């Protein structure tokens, strides 16, 4: 039986940031991760680029960076190594280099990394959460800690602890569709790279796609338009072109169906691209993710549930611990459209789904804290937010900030030998130090 100050379940952007912040603050910290790497959806899920980190203000040529100083330092290191940013997609990143850098950071901080380890259940001492049972290569092990952070994405730890939650959208519980991202290599990017922006580059390929769909040469009802991003490597493009409706990311069978159906859709579109689009004539499918991308499952009922109005008004909170300007990005649970855009506009975002121009919103600490679970925080997309608000805050950049804030809160709690219930969210904000400063360019 092993004893820690803090156990973090999930090693995605939020979990990695939480463990790094806590261990850097002197806590004995373990991180439980089911894959063999850090990064979560950014690595194993092949989700790219990073969204939610930029603030664009009218009249300013350069965007401002909304992330934490630690996240900024990480991205600058990747950029120095040629692994972050291109002209057409400034927030594109090389996930293999991200894995390596996260390994270095967390190992240097002394985090006990438990890869290839699955969360099984929670352990209680009286009524309080005291440990987790996990399955690793050694078998079933119990890990004990004073504090816990759920960064599993789906809130698996909080669910096992019996914390109440809602699933999907109100009424029918339907969840946003899953996505099987993929990468293609061998692409002739010469003409694409000459375009003024990524939309213009996509339009060159989309013209072939629209013609093929109209003529019946291609049957592809999963996307209405071609959607790819540039990637920081010659001849490589990253695609978000699949849509898998009706899957439950909290079900093994649901994930299996999402992955098999996602790969089937990838095969259709990549075969067509190679066959029919000149710049793809020598291209090939370079990489698929280890897991289908999941946008939505559980929404936990925390002390404060974020709502649509918080996003579109650019609301700030006294206990705000993360910030983002990302819009309400709802892929409709049925069909191939988006709630945030009109049909035929190729995903153009309606103003009613955005924060005010040049402004951002904050995520409050109370949305991580669950009533009755004093030593547990939910620091992932399953935090307390409505179906609509969660569609904005769920992306990876604000989740890194949420995780870092949770790790900081753990340090404050242990200094008092207490729980998260005794941590003042405003104190967490002050300890983070950057949120009351004007955002600057990265």
Image: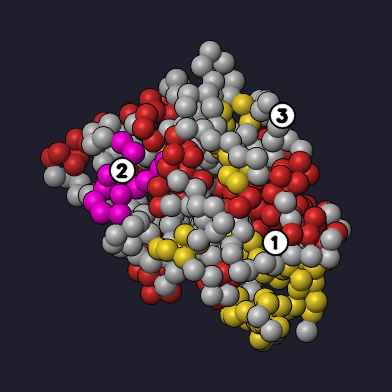
Q: CA distance from mark 2 to mark 3?
A: 34 Å
- The C terminus - image quarter: top right
Q: Nearer the viewer, mark 1 or mark 3?
A: 1
Around disc 1, counting alpha carbons within 10 Å, would you say few (fewer than 14), some (14 to 19), or many (20 or more)? some
Left or right side of 117 for 175: left
Q: CA distance from mark 1 to mark 3?
A: 27 Å
Q: Could you say where residue 79 lies in the image, as x and y percent from the top left?
A: 68, 35
Residue receiving disc 2: 338
Residue at the far left: name it.
Answer: 215
Residue receiving disc 3: 437
Q: Could you say where residue 109 lies in the image, as x and y percent from the top left?
A: 83, 56
Considering the numbered disc 3 on the image, is that residue within a helix, a strand or a loop? loop
Residue at the far top: name it.
Answer: 59
- What is the magenta segment's predominant secondary structure? loop
Please say if 39 is above or below 375. Answer: above
Q: Could you say where residue 15 lies in the image, as x and y percent from the top left?
A: 65, 58
Q: Which residues are magenta?
A: 327-341
Residue receiving disc 1: 421
Residue 46 appears in the figure: no
Q: Earlier in the sequence, mark 1 or mark 3?
A: 1
Q: Earlier in the sequence, mark 2 or mark 3?
A: 2
Around disc 2, counting alpha carbons within 10 Å, would you say few (fewer than 14), some (14 to 19), or many (20 or more)? some
- Displayed quadrant of residue 321: top right
Q: Nearer the viewer, mark 2 or mark 1?
A: 1
* Residue lying at 75% horizontally and 77% vertically, measured from the top left: 144
Q: Nearer the viewer, mark 2 or mark 3?
A: 3
Q: Could you say where residue 152 lies in the image, as x and y percent from the top left?
A: 57, 64
Around disc 3, counting alpha carbons within 10 Å, would you say few (fewer than 14), some (14 to 19), or many (20 or more)? few
Considering the numbered disc 1 on the image, is that residue within a helix, a strand or a loop? helix
- The N terminus - image quarter: bottom right
* Residue lying at 71% horizontally and 61% vertically, measured from the top left: 420
């Amino acid at each position: 039986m092993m004893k820690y100050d803090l156990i973090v379940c999930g090693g995605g952007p939020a979990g990695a940031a939480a463990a790094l912040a806590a261990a850097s603050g002197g806590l004995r910290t373990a991180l439980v991760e089911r894959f063999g790497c850090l990064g979560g959806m950014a690595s194993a899920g092949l989700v790219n680029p990073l969204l939610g980190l930029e603030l664009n203000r009218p009249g300013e040529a350069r965007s401002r960076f909304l992330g934490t100083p630690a996240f900024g330092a990480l991205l600058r290191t990747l950029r120095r190594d040629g692994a972050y940013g291109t002209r057409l997609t400034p927030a594109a990143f090389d996930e293999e280099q991200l894995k390596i850098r996260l390994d270095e950071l967390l190992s240097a901080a002394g985090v006990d990394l438990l890869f290839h380890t699955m969360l099984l259940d929670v352990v209680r001492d009286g009524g309080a959460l005291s440990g987790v049972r996990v399955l690793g290569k050694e078998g079933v092990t119990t890990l004990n800690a004073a504090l816990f952070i759920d960064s599993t994405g789906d809130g698996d730890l909080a669910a096992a602890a019996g914390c109440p939650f809602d699933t999907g959208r109100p009424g029918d519980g339907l969840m946003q569709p899953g996505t099987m991202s993929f990468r293609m290599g061998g692409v002739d990017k010469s003409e694409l790279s000459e375009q003024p922006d990524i939309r213009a580059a996509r339009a060159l390929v989309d013209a072939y796609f629209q013609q093929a769909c109209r003529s019946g040469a291609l049957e592809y009802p999963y996307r209405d338009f071609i959607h790819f991003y540039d990637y920081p490597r010659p001849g490589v493009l990253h695609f978000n072109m699949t849509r898998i409706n009706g899957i439950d990311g909290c079900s093994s069978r649901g994930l299996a169906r999402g992955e098999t159906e996602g790969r089937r859709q990838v095969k259709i579109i990549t075969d067509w691209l190679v066959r029919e689009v000149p710049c793809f004539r020598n291209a090939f499918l370079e990489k698929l993710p280890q897991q289908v991308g999941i946008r939505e499952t559980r929404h936990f009922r925390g002390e404060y549930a974020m709502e649509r109005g918080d996003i579109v008004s650019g609301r700030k909170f006294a206990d705000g611990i993360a910030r983002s300007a990302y819009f309400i990005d709802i892929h409709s649970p049925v069909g191939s459209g988006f709630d945030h855009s009109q049909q035929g506009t190729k995903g153009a975002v309606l103003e009613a789904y955005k924060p005010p121009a040049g402004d951002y919103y904050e995520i409050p600490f109370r949305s991580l804290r669950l009533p009755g679970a004093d030593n547990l925080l939910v620091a992932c997309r399953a935090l307390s937010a409505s179906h609509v608000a969660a569609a904005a805050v769920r992306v990876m950049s604000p989740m890194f900030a949420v995780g870092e804030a949770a790790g900081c809160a753990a340090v404050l709690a242990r200094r008092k030998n207490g729980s998260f219930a005794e941590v003042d969210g405003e104190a967490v904000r002050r300890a983070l130090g950057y949120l009351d400063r004007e955002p600057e360019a990265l």
